[in-house]
Amino acid sequence: MDPFLTTLPDPLSIRTACRTVIQRAHWVSLDFSALPTLADRLPHPLPNLPAWDHPLHWRGTPEQTANYVLLLDALNFCFWGEPRWQVEYGGRTYDGYWALAASLRRALDCGLPLWDPHFLSRLTDAEITALFAGQGTIPLLEWRIRHVREIARGLIEHCRGSFATLIAAAGGSSIELVRLVVGTFPSFDDVATYDGQRVPFYKRAQLLCTDLAGAFRGTGLGCFHDLDLLTAFADYKLPQVLRAFGVLRYHPELAARIDARQEIPAGSPEEVEIRAATVLAVDALTLSLRTRGLPAAPWRVDWALWQLGQNLPPDAPPYHRTRSRFY
């Protein structure tokens, strides 16, 4: 399978940029002969909608829920570190994304209206910091404080206080909502530069669309007619899974750095190549599944790979470590 010929529609220009990156890549390559083995490990059927019915997730009115999901995804990035930041909730201890969800759910349980942009706009740095109180400190705290303020400001100044306004303007198109979100909330404008070329990824903006679909069970404010046009959400977990199954191959020097858990700088050629290869690998896996007669879309494959990544064996290669507010 030729990764440069088997292309899917590219309304956000992500796929075209990623193909150009991999055509020039030095650090990362793709081995599509490994796709069948990985495809066999995925659940069939693939997840239809992201699972939102979890005790740590929250729903209010439709408008409150939309605002809350926006805030959650504005804060959903970079949880790695030693020791890991952890949050206790309901008698359990969580880390990673679930620690974030637990911290926000804890605040909601205490009566804090996190869906209200006017409330968010009045929070002090110390009060925002207190939202994430737990064992250790959440990474990139200063960026999370900025993102809370950005969400409050954007909702008040551009959305009449309600994210539902922006969703309605997208007209049921996840692609259009991605464009509106990255234009309204700069923290979602996830774009790298590689060899002088602009490379958009829009990881959290695209994830936001599928999270809305999950939160609203594919109806109302979560009803989108073009989710299948989204790309994979290029982060650090999917490349780990793809590498473990031999789809992503790293230059020996890069592999050694990742295995030694050395930080890979955000925006470096190595990091951009990893993310670009992830997008193309998921596209190729999607097309491979379709040739088997199985319904597949990149965002559904992404969710399946993420779930697979939660149960990798202890000897699996580690994920690459990049301090980034985009994933």
Image (tube, grey):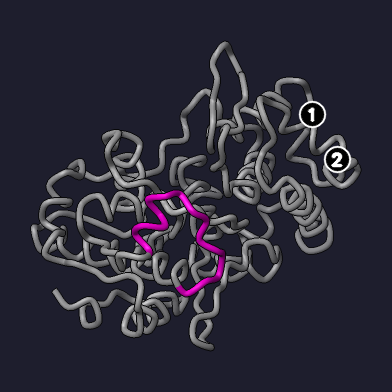
**Is 26 placed above or below 180 here?**
below
Q: Secondary structure at mark 1?
A: loop
Residue depicted at 16% across the width and 58% down the height = 289
Q: Which residue is mark 1?
A: 112
The image quadrant that residue 120 belongs to is top right
Of all residues, the one furthest to the top in this rendering is 91
> In this view of the protein, which residue sits in the foreground, 143 or 303?
143
Residue at 81% x, 46% y: name it.
117
Instruction: Give the quadrant of the C terminus.
Output: bottom right
Question: Mark 2 — residue?
Answer: 119
List x then y, in percent, for residue 161.
79, 52
Q: Quadrant of the N terminus?
A: bottom left
Of all residues, the one furthest to the bottom in this rendering is 196
Residue 49 picture location, percent across and down? 37, 44
Q: Is residue 39 magenta?
A: no
| Contact check, label 1 and label 2, Cβ < 8 Å | yes
Quarter of image, res 291: bottom left
